[in-house]
Image: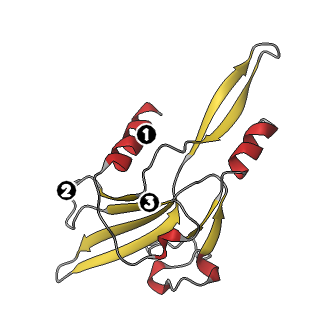
Amino acid sequence: MRVENILKTKAEGIMCYRCVAAFSGYDKSEQLCSQFNGNKTFQVSCPTSTFCVKKTIYYKSQTSMVKTVQRDCATQKYLSKSYDHEKREWYDTEEVIKTVYEEGCATGEDRGATGRPPEYCYCNSNLCNFSPSNNTRNGNGILLFKRLMQIL
């Protein structure tokens, strides 16, 4: 991997809150969202992100609707291969795609699950994914992200 690409991505970073839902198989070292209180143990450095994300997922059980809120760094790192014609070899390149998301919230795709579709909220300042409230906007950020995933 080329040094300039590593430095480029590390310079982009943001601080976010990170927690995971307690599903089977989760890493015991991860902080659980059910215990989220915003203290320093939930804070992480995101060197390859310029956005934080808060994902709200709804699960329907036999008796009620369960809401889970997950917090993390937004996925923006793009890995690719480039060819150096002089050296006649391939090398890895890494960059942060800044235009993947827009600040705000969007409802995800309804894939027929028993609960409601997930909601994704993106923000671009340090520790901005703390907020318990969501303001849903249009889904342009989600659509752009889906298009990027189709290309890859």
Report whether residue 14 is seen.
yes
Q: Report the front residue among 80 and 52.
A: 52
Residue shown at 44%/37% (left/top)?
148
Labels 3 and 2: the sequence-earlier one: 2
- Is 67 situated left or right of 151 in this image? left
Q: Farthest residue in the left direction?
A: 63
Sequence-first tag of 1 and 2: 2
Residue under circle 3? 122
Image-based side of 40 in relation to 104, left or right: right
Mark 3, other Cα within 10 Å: few <14 / some 14–19 / many ≥20: many
Considering only vertical position in the picture, is 140 above or below 23?
above
Q: Nearer the viewer, mark 3 or mark 1?
A: 3
Where is residue 141 shown, x and y percent of the image? 38, 48
Res 21 quadrant in image: bottom left
Q: Residue at x 82, y 17 (%)?
A: 87
Q: Which residue is mark 2?
A: 112
Q: Residue at x 43, y 76 (%)?
A: 131
Front in this rendered view, residue 139 or 69 = 139
Crowdedness near tag 2: few (<14), some (14–19) or many (≥20) residues, C-alpha within 10 Å: few
Q: CA distance from mark 1 to mark 2?
A: 21 Å
In the displayed structure, does residue 73 sit left or right of residue 85? Answer: left
The three-letter code of the residue at mark 1 reads: Met
Q: What amino acid type should be assigned to the residue bearing mark 2? A: Gly
The answer to which quarter of the image holds residue 2 is top right
89, above or below 8, in the image: above
Q: Position of residue 81 (x, y in %)?
A: 65, 28
* Position of 65 relative to 99 (above/below): below
Residue 124 pos. (x, y %): 52, 59
| Coloring scheme used | secondary structure
* Residue type at the position of mark 3: Tyr
> 103 or 35: which is nearer to us?
103
